Amino acid sequence: MRRLGASTRRATIEYLPAGLLLAALIAGWEAWVRIFDTRPYIMPAPSRVWTAFLETRGTLPEHITTTLSEALLGLAIAAAAGVALAAILALTPLVRRVLYPILVVSQTIPMIVLAPLLVIWFGFGMTPKVVVVALFGFFPICVSTAEGLLTADREMTGLVRSMGGGRLASLRYVEIPAALPSFFSGLKIAATYAVLGAVIGEWVGASSGLGIFITRAQTAFRVDRVFVAVAVIAVVSVALFAAVHVAARLTTPWMYVNKENKS
Amino acid sequence: MSTIDVRGLGHTFGDLRVLKDVSLQAPGGTFASIVGPSACGKSTLLRVLAGLLVPDEGTAEVGGVSTVSRPGLVSYMPQKDLLLPWRRVLGNATLGAEVGGIKRAEAKRQAGALMERFGLAGFERAWPSQLSGGMRQRLALLRTFLAPAKTMLLDEPFGALDAITRREMHGWLQSVLGAEQRTVLFITHDVEEALLLSDRVYVMSPRPGRIIADVPVTFPKPRPSGAVLAPEFIRLKAELLGALGG
Ligand SMILES: Nc1ncnc2c1ncn2[C@@H]1O[C@H](COP(=O)(O)OP(=O)(O)O)[C@@H](O)[C@H]1O
Ligand SMILES: [Mg+2]
């Protein structure tokens, strides 16, 4: 328990400055809107956004559930496909030479342009949203995992080989564990964009989700509700990021060892 | 116990001739050292014996079997400790045994029984990054020790340690090996260390490396660190330094 208390305190100290800055910005924003009497359909005050949040409390959970499911499913597909392709890229130099440049170029396709096309291809259901999330997340996961596999210490794989281990042993004992931290860095980036990806997918057409919530708010000039959605997206994204962080800590505990701890 | 038998070994990296006609025969159960100036090809020779490097010329055999392209015949401790950061102390200790086909539970049991002797008791669940330099080295040695192949190749195992830790390790290594009859090929650039530990010391020339002296050391073992002061020890040391300098 003492350790938990200490780590909570450390976290508080670490995030305190950022929290204070955020609070100051919100206060400044509230003051600005009141002093200049800005119209709420141009820029609502934080207090008004809060009221809008309380109004929409009843319907929001359903939208969040929809968007979060799309984000999680897309993320899972991105992780599975990203790791699979990373393994192929890392293990076969020829495929790497052919595919890697194409993969990089594919990242220049703007997702905003792709989203409507995906709706045409996959309809208005959940599929196009999941595909957008998966496409967003695939690249960072694949590239960092491949990088991790490729940069595994040659001397360590040599050591396993000297013990009589084959390709599989060197993958199991060296390359895969060496690539895990990189995989999680990629997954963190993907998780950061996952909710956003789902929202972009919903924008084009959906019956439920934060994207359609935003579209409806905009058509009704309810800018305050748009801000509610923005805040919710931020909170859900941070929660997803934190979940990946926890998973990384549990899976790669050696990355979080206190190095000062020598006896 | 396996004899180490190297004949006419030669190797070139690009234009760099590293080994030239290296021959040595260490009978089974011998603790043999190789001393030589840095970059003379000592590690390269061990990599050939470990089955990791195919030499341009010559043969290398352990127990009558060629090690060329045949890893696993010897237990090899590279110059860097190469502890796997993602395995705890116990997991690193059992790595060679596990890869060598010993059941994990059995490997753990064997490692557990040796923790005390290797000065690692109580650290089974620590990560390598939490160990001191001497402990890392002992752990790498334990890993080498537990591998199923009983012939050991040790590449400057104490090279990175400070003088005091190093002296401790000399006494400790002798006591650990005292009970076991193992063939060991030990690389060092420290003449005193070689004399203290070995039954036999080979001297290698500067690159391209060749064996230029083969000195038997017959003091009774184990040898306390004070042994280095004996006149006979000093005479051998002078002989080896002469060979190295010339
Ligand atoms: N894989 C390699 N490719 C090219 N040169 C190498 C390679 N390995 C070692 N060398 C070179 O061979 C020489 C001998 O190396 P090494 O056997 O490590 O020497 P030592 O262990 O005696 O210090 C050095 O000059 C080193 O730079
Ligand atoms: Mg060397």
Image: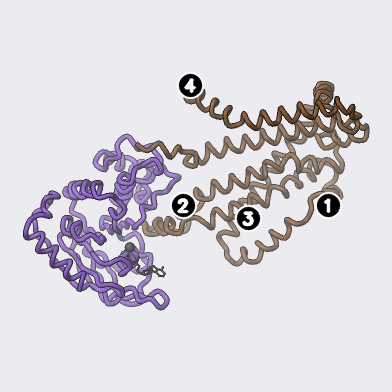
Q: CA distance from mark 3 to mark 4?
A: 43 Å
Q: Quadrant of ligand 2?
A: bottom left
Side of B105 relative to B191 (left or right): right
Q: Are marks 2 and 3 in contact (CB under 8 Å)?
A: no
Mark 3 or mark 2, which is nearer the start of the sequence? 3
Are discs 3 and 4 located on one and the same chain? yes
Q: Which residue is mark 3?
A: A85
Is residue A29 depicted above or below A105 in this figure?
above
Both labels 4 and 1 in a single chain = yes
Q: Earlier in the sequence, mark 4 or mark 1?
A: 4
Residue toward you, B107 or A244: A244
User: Dot 2, how many residues are within 10 Å of its Cα: few (below 14), some (14-19), or many (20+)?
Assistant: many
**Could you tell me which residue is drawn at 72 percent across and 60 percent down?**
A105
State whether label 1 is within 8 Å of ligand 1: no
Residue position for label 2: A174
Image position, residue A141 (x, y; %): 63, 49
Task: Please tell me how crowded label 3 is: few (under 14), some (14-19), or many (20+) other residues with Cα within 10 Å.
Answer: many
Q: Give residue B128's position: percent from left, percent from top.
A: 39, 43
Q: Is residue B67 visible?
A: no
Circle 1 residue: A113
Question: Which callout, 4 or 1, points to the residue nearer the camera?
Answer: 4
Looking at the image, tell me whether mark 3 or mark 4 is earlier in sequence order: 4
* Residue plotted at (41% across, 43% down): B129
Tag 2 subunit: A
* Chain letter belonging to callout 1: A
Q: Position of residue A259 (x, y in %)?
A: 43, 40
Question: Are dots 1 and 2 in contact, CB under 8 Å?
Answer: no
Residue bearing mark 4 = A1
